[in-house]
Image (spheres, grey):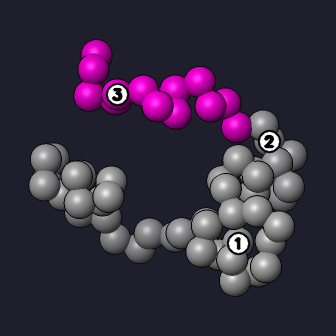
Amino acid sequence: MDIEWLQRDLGLYVVNMFDTGQAARVLNCARFSLAYLLQQYCDVDADKQYQMADWRMR
């Protein structure tokens, strides 16, 4: 999990996180991805170019 990695490797602790996927499930949305929710409710196309990038590399 990303949160465990942030805590273990960087000492960062996440508080008050909002899970958009879980919210989409509660609202019975057709799909649960952030890209879908951004398009559906904000008319924004999510750029997936860096989705699989290793952000530790500079």
Q: Position of residue 52 (x, y in %)?
A: 46, 31
Circle 2 sits in a helix, a strand or a loop, which is it? Answer: loop
Q: Secondary structure at mark 1?
A: helix
| CA neighbours of label 1 inside 10 A, class few (<14), some (14 to 19), many (20+) | some
In magenta stretch: residue 57:
yes
Q: Residue 14's mark?
A: none
* Direction from residue 27 to residue 51 in the image, left or right: left
Question: Which residue is rendered at x = 80% and y = 41% of the image?
Answer: 44
Residue type pointed to by label 2: Val
Q: Residues within 10 Å of mark 2 (few under 14, many from 20)?
A: few
Mark closest to the chain's N terminus, 2 or 1: 1
Mark 2 → mark 1, Cα distance in angstroms: 17 Å
Q: In whole angstroms, how far apart are the C-alphas of marks 3 and 2? A: 24 Å
Can you identify the residue that label 1 sits on? 24
Q: Residue at x 13, y 55 (%)?
A: 8
Q: Which residue is mark 2?
A: 44
Q: Amino acid at mark 1?
A: Ala
Please tell me whether mark 2 or mark 1 is closer to you in this view: 1
The N terminus - image quarter: bottom left
Q: What residue lies at 15% left-to-right and 47% top-to-bottom?
A: 10
* Pointer 3 local density, CA inside 10 Å: few below 14, some 14–19, many at least 20: few
Residue at x 69% of width, y 83% of height: 26
Query: Where residue 37 sits: x, y (%)?
Result: 75, 57
| Left or right side of 37 for 18 | left
Quarter of the picture holding the C terminus:
top left
Q: Earlier in the sequence, mark 1 or mark 3?
A: 1
Return the residue at label 3: 54
Q: Which residues are magenta?
A: 46-58
